[in-house]
């Protein structure tokens, strides 16, 4: 699955990542939200990005029907481990979570949290990505570190 970037590049979600997202879709009434971090690579000599790994819900995360809060320390350990194993080529690229709606839109809470992530997280890029996995589609947004503006991306 690919989405257009303003830089004329694309962001691609690998099949492995799509498979993980499919596992956590909230298809039943009692299913709690799930989420984690996005990890991937900047493709050299292009503006393309590939998300090929994600962290998944962990024991100390808070999961409710319409709320997810990840435990930063637990997810950070995984992010750091993957970064080290890849010799710095697999980078933190953003956050993902699910919504119990067909075509997801961010809540006001989501937008405030994303702004906090943009302001307070240490990362190499100028932008971070925020994905919401709905029951029928995936919404992808990009947030700019400098302006804190968040824009929805369109699928290629």
Image: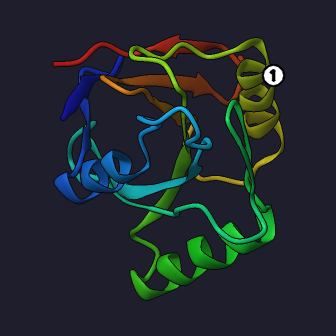
| Label 1 element class | helix
Horizontally, residue 137 falls left or right of residue 34, namely left
Horizontally, residue 143 falls left or right of residue 140, namely right
Query: Which residue appears at 58% of the width and 49% of the height?
Result: 35
Q: Give the percent coordinates (x, y) of residue 32.
A: 62, 43
Q: Give the percent coordinates (x, y) of residue 80.
A: 61, 77
Horizontally, residue 88 falls left or right of residue 63, namely left
> Relative to residue 109, is residue 12 depicted above or below?
below
> Relative to residue 141, is residue 54 depicted above or below?
below
* Quarter holding residue 90: bottom left
Query: Which residue appears at 52% of the width and 26% of the height?
Result: 100
Query: Which residue appears at 18% of the width and 35% of the height?
Result: 1
> Relative to residue 23, is residue 95 depicted above or below?
above
> Relative to residue 156, is residue 97 depicted above or below?
below
Q: 95 and 120: which one is in front?
A: 95
Q: 154 and 46: which one is in front?
A: 154
Query: Which residue appears at 24% of the width and 20% of the height?
Result: 8
Q: Residue furthest bottom?
A: 85
Q: Residue furthest front?
A: 29
- Residue that numbered label 1 is attached to: 112
Horizontally, residue 130 falls left or right of residue 61, namely left
């Amino acid at each position: 699955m690919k989405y257009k970037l303003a830089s004329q590049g694309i962001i691609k979600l690998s099949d492995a990542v799509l498979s993980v997202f499919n596992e956590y879709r909230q298809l039943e009434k009692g299913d709690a939200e799930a989420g984690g971090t996005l990890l991937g690579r900047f493709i050299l000599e292009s503006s393309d990005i590939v998300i090929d790994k994600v962290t998944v819900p962990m024991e100390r995360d808070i999961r409710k029907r319409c709320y997810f809060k990840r435990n930063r320390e637990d997810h950070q350990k995984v992010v750091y481990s993957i970064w080290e194993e890849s010799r710095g080529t697999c980078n933190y690229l953003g956050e993902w979570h699910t919504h119990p709606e067909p075509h997801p839109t961010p809540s006001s809470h989501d937008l405030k949290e994303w702004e906090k992530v943009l302001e307070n997280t240490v990362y190499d890029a100028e932008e971070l990505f925020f994905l919401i996995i709905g029951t029928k589609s995936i919404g992808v947004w990009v947030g700019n570190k400098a302006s804190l503006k968040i824009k929805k991306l369109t699928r290629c």
